[in-house]
Amino acid sequence: MANLAYIVVIAAGAYTYAVLTIGPDTGNGGFQHYILGYQLPFFAAVIAAAAVGAGVGVLIGVTGLKRIRQDYQAMVMLVISIMAATVIGAAPSFLGGEPGISLVPNPFSNLSAVTGAWAYVAMVAFACLIGYLVLRKFTGGPMGRALRAMRDDEHAAAAMGFSVVRMRLLTQAVGGAFGGVSGALLVAFIGGWSPGAWAYVETLALLTAVIVGGMGNDFGVTLGTFVIAVLLLQGVQFLPQIRSHTGLTEALGWMVLGLLTIGFLWFRPQGVFRERRPKYRLRPDPTGDPSSGALAGRRG
C-alpha cells in the first residue's frame, strides 16, 4: 500500500528538531511563536526526532489496520496529510502556523559557509550509509521473509503464525524513525520549516523514486531516490528561467516526475531493478534419507 502520509512523518521530525534546538520564542525579537523552545545538542534532538517520527508513523499506520481496500487506505492517508498541514497552519502559537519556524540552528554554523556546507554533506552521507545498513538488517533474514509473506498474502502469513498487525505497526514505526531523522537533517540544513514545505505532493516524489528504482530492491530504491529527488527535482533549479512563464522551470520537474510514474507503471512496473528473491538449497538429512532434507541457508 502506498503511504501517502509519509511526508507528515518527515514534518514531525523537522518540527521536533526545530523546537528542541531553536531556543525560546522570546528570542530573536519574539517575532515567532512555538511550543517548547529548548536548546538541546544536535544529536539529542535528532534522536528525539526519530522517536517522534516513529510514534507518528504508528499513529498513521493504525488507519491501515481496518480491512478496507488498499486504494481506500491510500486515500485515507492522503486526507491525513492534507488535514495535518491544514491544522498546523491554523495554529500560529503551536508550531508557527503558516509562516512556520525559521532560524533553526545548523550544527556547523561556526564554520565558514563552504566548509560548513561540505561538512553537512559528509554527515548526511554517513547517516545515509548507517540507515542503509540498518535497513538491510531489517529487511534481510527472517524478518524480511515475514514481511514479504505479509505483503503477498496476509492470510497465509497469519496462518503461519505471524502477527500481521504487529508487523504492520513495526514497519510503520521503523519507516517513521527514518522519516523523523530525514526531517531533522533537512530542517537543520535549510534553517526553516512551514506547512508549505510538506505538501502531499512531496510524498509522490518519494513514491516515484520507489517505483522507478524497483519496489522490494534496496539498491534500486536508493538509486531511484538519487535520480528523482536529487538529479530531477533539484537539478531543474539550475535551468534558465523562462521570463514569459514564471515558475514553469520549477514545474518542469514535477511534470517529468508524473510522466515517469505513469511510464514505469505502464511499461515496467517492477522498476529498473527487480526484487531479488532469496534462494535456498536443501541440506542432506543427517540420517542418510535422501528423500528428506532441511533448508541449509541463504545462497543468493
Image: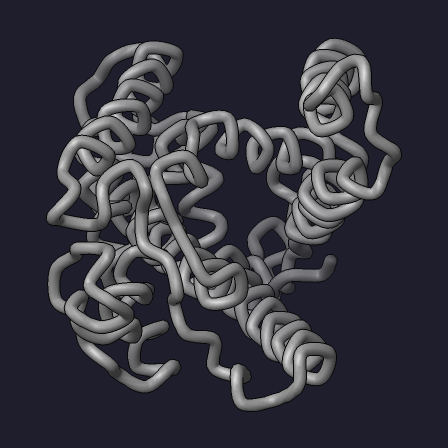
Task: Pick whichever, 279 or 283, lies toward us.
Answer: 279
- Foreground pick, 164 / 250: 250
Q: Is residue 255 visible?
A: yes
x, y percent for residue 36 = 12, 67
* Residue 54 found in image quarter: bottom left
- Quarter of the image with the N terminus in it: top left
Q: State whether residue 189 is above or below residue 147.
A: below
> Which residue sits at x=54%, y=84%?
108
Q: Quadrant of the C terminus?
A: bottom right
Residue 269 visible in the shown view: no
Q: Which residue appears at 52% of the width and 60% of the height? A: 190
- State the image quarter where residue 192 is shown: bottom left
Depth order, front residue of 198/50: 198
In the figure, is residue 191 to the left or right of 33? right
Q: How is the image coloured?
A: one colour
260 vs 232: above or below = above
Residue 194 at what x, y percent from top left? 36, 44
Residue at coordinates 77% horizontally, 26% vertically from top-left?
A: 249
Residue 37 position within the rendered picture, expressed as x and y whole percent measured from the top left = 17, 70
The residue positioned farthest toward the right in the image shown? 240
- Image vertical order of residue 76 relative to residue 24, above or below: above
**In the displayed structure, does residue 167 sit left or right of residue 136?**
left
Residue positioned 48% across, 65% down in the render: 185
